Amino acid sequence: MIIVTKKSSKDEDVERLKQKIEELGLKAHISKGSRRTIIGVIGDIDKKIEKIDPVAVFSLDKAVDSVHRVSKPYKLASRENKDYDTIIDVKGIKIGGENFTMMAGPCSVENREQMLTTATGIKKCSAHILRGGAFKPRTSPYTFQGLGEEGLKLLKEAGEKTNMPIVTEVMNPKDLDVVLKYADILQIGARNIQNFSLLKLVGQTDKPVLLKRGMATTIQEFLMSAEYVMSEGNADVILCERGIRTFETATRNTLDISAVPVLKKETHLPVIIDPSHAAGKREYVPALARAAIAAGADGLLIEVHYNPAIAVSDAAQQLTIEEFCELMEDIKKIAAVVGKVIQ
Amino acid sequence: MIIVTKKSSKDEDVERLKQKIEELGLKAHISKGSRRTIIGVIGDIDKKIEKIDPVAVFSLDKAVDSVHRVSKPYKLASRENKDYDTIIDVKGIKIGGENFTMMAGPCSVENREQMLTTATGIKKCSAHILRGGAFKPRTSPYTFQGLGEEGLKLLKEAGEKTNMPIVTEVMNPKDLDVVLKYADILQIGARNIQNFSLLKLVGQTDKPVLLKRGMATTIQEFLMSAEYVMSEGNADVILCERGIRTFETATRNTLDISAVPVLKKETHLPVIIDPSHAAGKREYVPALARAAIAAGADGLLIEVHYNPAIAVSDAAQQLTIEEFCELMEDIKKIAAVVGKVIQ
Amino acid sequence: MIIVTKKSSKDEDVERLKQKIEELGLKAHISKGSRRTIIGVIGDIDKKIEKIDPVAVFSLDKAVDSVHRVSKPYKLASRENKDYDTIIDVKGIKIGGENFTMMAGPCSVENREQMLTTATGIKKCSAHILRGGAFKPRTSPYTFQGLGEEGLKLLKEAGEKTNMPIVTEVMNPKDLDVVLKYADILQIGARNIQNFSLLKLVGQTDKPVLLKRGMATTIQEFLMSAEYVMSEGNADVILCERGIRTFETATRNTLDISAVPVLKKETHLPVIIDPSHAAGKREYVPALARAAIAAGADGLLIEVHYNPAIAVSDAAQQLTIEEFCELMEDIKKIAAVVGKVIQ
Amino acid sequence: MIIVTKKSSKDEDVERLKQKIEELGLKAHISKGSRRTIIGVIGDIDKKIEKIDPVAVFSLDKAVDSVHRVSKPYKLASRENKDYDTIIDVKGIKIGGENFTMMAGPCSVENREQMLTTATGIKKCSAHILRGGAFKPRTSPYTFQGLGEEGLKLLKEAGEKTNMPIVTEVMNPKDLDVVLKYADILQIGARNIQNFSLLKLVGQTDKPVLLKRGMATTIQEFLMSAEYVMSEGNADVILCERGIRTFETATRNTLDISAVPVLKKETHLPVIIDPSHAAGKREYVPALARAAIAAGADGLLIEVHYNPAIAVSDAAQQLTIEEFCELMEDIKKIAAVVGKVIQ
């Protein structure tokens, strides 16, 4: 931590700050500038000061202009602590490292025909993992909320018939047990990215967790949410960028494609992109999907429906099976350019 | 709902759209323009089309340029459905209408001395409701997470000794029962504004719900979250604006002061402001608090600590008791100007 | 400036950085932490390193994790360099300090009747300065672009008849001479906040400059734009917050009310609020105007039209004269509460 | 234009609106819904109503809930008016259509050695157009402002020696003549995207204009700025996305990669990406550049410096010549996948 004093600060102010630092069991290193003094605070702040927020505490001092935190608040998720890529194995499908993984399927599980037709269609075009929502977070209480366990059964059945592991969202702690019975990967939705109770719970399971970045979540906060899961003992976290909220309304959200290289630098966890929720419109999805693999992502999560026109949710953004297969041709070619392997 | 066709659309396209609308039990009203056709869709879309998203479905049609929703998606929360202000009574303290209500107290409940000293101090300066967090949503898993039920007991004790109802956050469905034992108002935090499972649960209780707007929540989504609570039967929802996330970093968040007149126009529910989380710095809180009442808010939720320098969380933004009392003097005078009554 | 090294940095890295700092004529103060080294760079960076960006240069070093600038980039505008409020006198009307100044008038100058009727109407209700646009920045090339010099004459005439100084926008360097012939205050619009050529030019005049914050301008950049004007010799800059661009669409822009206390802390320059462009809708303007004075602003810039229904621009956000007069009643009462004087 | 009435509107309200519409020489088409009335306004609003903003005027009516504009405000830039891609020829280098064009060079022109070394280096790796700033928009008045005409001469010389056309920014109308003497493409910087005086001026030249999107410019506003240039007679506009301002601070700006497919759908103009200003850090530039071509962009504008460590501006984000050449290998391979030709 670095403390910068105000121009008006005096020697006695610096002395007082130094004492405060030492009382906390830390060391102060003082650099007097021409106009301000800079105090380096040395020691493991998080260990020494369990219950207080050191940045806030020193910010309050009348002689202090600003306080800068130097050490990163995430530890288990940081590449500084693990310098090789995490590779997660889900029933033989590998996520992370040199692998590029395709997760696809409808927004909501609707019925058996929809699931089987869609799953069979995408499997033929190299999809690895089947997605589908059984518990749906909907902005309005008056719209379709998902089929619940019935949906999980249909998703599982389609996954088994096509030999694909399944990923599905868990929204509510009380549904975790039932979701665990079926899911191979637990998805935490964007709206629950800072639902810390839920993060802790999935951190106590042994299933990989696919964590979707929230619409207003910074990359640092995103990694802190991964840290919540990991600090409970579950190291298998997949990070998913799906668009952030900005002033632009031409797309549903703004895909933060830069998050790919930034996350790859900061963390060893796999990073995938969901172009469907970012775009909000089917016609923009292929461009964003190609951008994702070109930027270095480890996979894609794409909404595909065998007949989007009758979809109960997100109809406008789901690809048809044909569109998905066409996209896969491009993805395979770009994978070769960027050194990714598609199983 | 209004459907606007592309310039290239033909008569047969319009005919096809009309049929689709009529198949859904709705009526189509067609206006042919010089370059485009506008189709008004008449009927209760939400009732007729239970499971599909009509905007999305028509967006998919190749002849359609854009689809506009006309009716508001919130109903119970809308002023169109109830044209007088909701006034909530919490143990004799009134919230809404002409009343201006002061909710104050520390960020986290820390210990008995802190709670009693702070509660006594603010009560003397006309605080009405005591706040304090026992279950704390923290960005980092390594920081103080709240005292839990022990904290609720201390909060309750301080409330009883100073004759103030208490408001406290519930984060986790499994904690709801214990929070209900103590709390007079249930707070839903900004990070849980779209935790729909939690919203439904508090909607099934008979306690008023203080709903904090999320950092990236539009006003329409905010009202939809209120609608979730209300659609379960609980009409006593208090809306709290606490800053949204923007590009500006001089403050922790950007207080959306315009949300006050916008919400007062759209809904009959009480609207309060939390200037502490918006500012993130104590020195800016009084200016924002004065702005809130001047803009027409129904109350304030302010963090106050008898000694912020030793606070375990949000130290930088909590007012001292003296600062709170000084602020209250201004608030009372502005209340008189804008026609608000402070009990 | 503070340089923080990576965890992997070695003694030789620190030595190399130290040498680089000393070559630039600056001093390095080194604090070795348990995991990283913090280097305080002492000396006047801006003086020593004319042509390079020191933050960028050191960011490039392979051993560097982050670089923090400590000294503020604005000097003339900073309260650290002038600790009393700037008060600008425009033909006897004072702006800044304890004064609260009302600037009002139509969006565009349209014709003599409009200007005289509006000016007479608002003058009766204590407006101090008359606004009106003669050169209009319009998003579309196909809409009304202003009356030009003809408009300036009408504005001037209305100002003289009602004994009010006038403020009007200059968009184009080549129009500066003609605007200078008429205007008492030069307005720089939000879209030109970083039109540095124009800022330098108005900095060379002896007329006060009203600087409107851009839609994506941080407070620091806003002060840097003021610095551009001041560094050319013109110290009379008035800062105007008029809403920033965020994800919220219920209002035209999001009024950053917190900018008032933040700017009052950082600078000695007067700070005013334009609630009309922030709101974009007439019905929200009074609430924002009241919030502005309550938050400590030094004045308001409000769009008023004697008949908004026939206005050629911004029709939706202009107050009627009656609405303006009604608002002024509230403003006067709140001024008394916050210690402001209305001449 | 579509007018939606309030639920409380009456027949006489609708009649009044109808009359107002007809007075303007337009036709009203009325659809009565169960709760509201929808009025389609038919006719060319922009032609009929020269001076007024029709959306604003009708928004003011007490019976109106909302007004929706249907026709797009841009015409010359719209793909609806020209359904094949604009291809711009700059001394034999083609921009747009199936061509992928590489523009590269240093942020600022600094000296002859820098320009020649950099130009020669990038030319060997297939750069087509040389960039370099002679007039620099700098946030601070105290930093390097560019070499002016001296810089233009050095840029021109380097361009001629390496047989590359040059692109450089014009900031100030008074510099236009001198810039025209040297430049092959005129760049309008992000900060001047709504400097309408400047847009009109470059619209009157016969040089192609490279228009950089502003940090808070919507895609619609971006196209309206192109329309300003085109409406003056200059049809050769190149659109450049360079990052928008969001809450995320891990990168200098947030590259809006979705702007590529959105713009390609809306307009026939070429769309290029500047990954350097979006990223702000050299290490993220290659990933964003690869994403750009994969998403369908028509070219890149990249900052390259033969020795970034001594660059006078943007040191942190400029690639070395080696990094540029390495990136070009990937670009060529992805071009083949997406059907782009690199001359």
Image (cartoon, coloured by chain):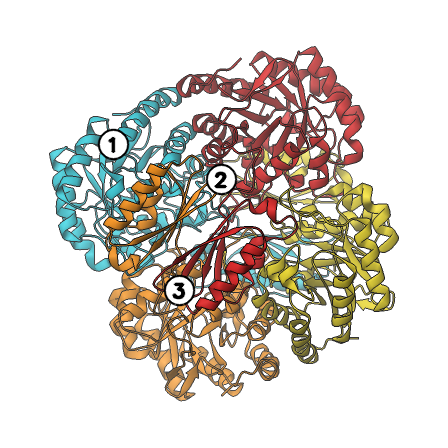
Chain colours: A cyan, B orange, C yellow, D red
Q: How many marks?
A: 3
Residue in the picture at 36% in, 83% down: B157
Quick one: SS at disc 2? loop
- In the picture of the structure, the residue carrying the numbered disc 2 is C7
- In the picture of the structure, the residue carrying the numbered disc 1 is A321
Subunit bearing disc 1: A
> Which of B216 and A184 lies nearest the eye of the viewer?
B216
Where does residue B127 sit, x and y in percent of width and height?
Answer: 49, 83
Subunit bearing disc 2: C
- In the picture of the structure, the residue carrying the numbered disc 3 is B223
> Which of A216 and D81 lies nearest the eye of the viewer?
D81
Quick one: SS at disc 3? helix
Residue type at mark 2? Answer: Lys
Subunit bearing disc 3: B
Mark 3–mark 2 CB contact (< 8 Å):
no
Mark 1–mark 3 CB contact (< 8 Å):
no
Label 2 crowd (10 A; few <14 / some 14-19 / many >=20) = some
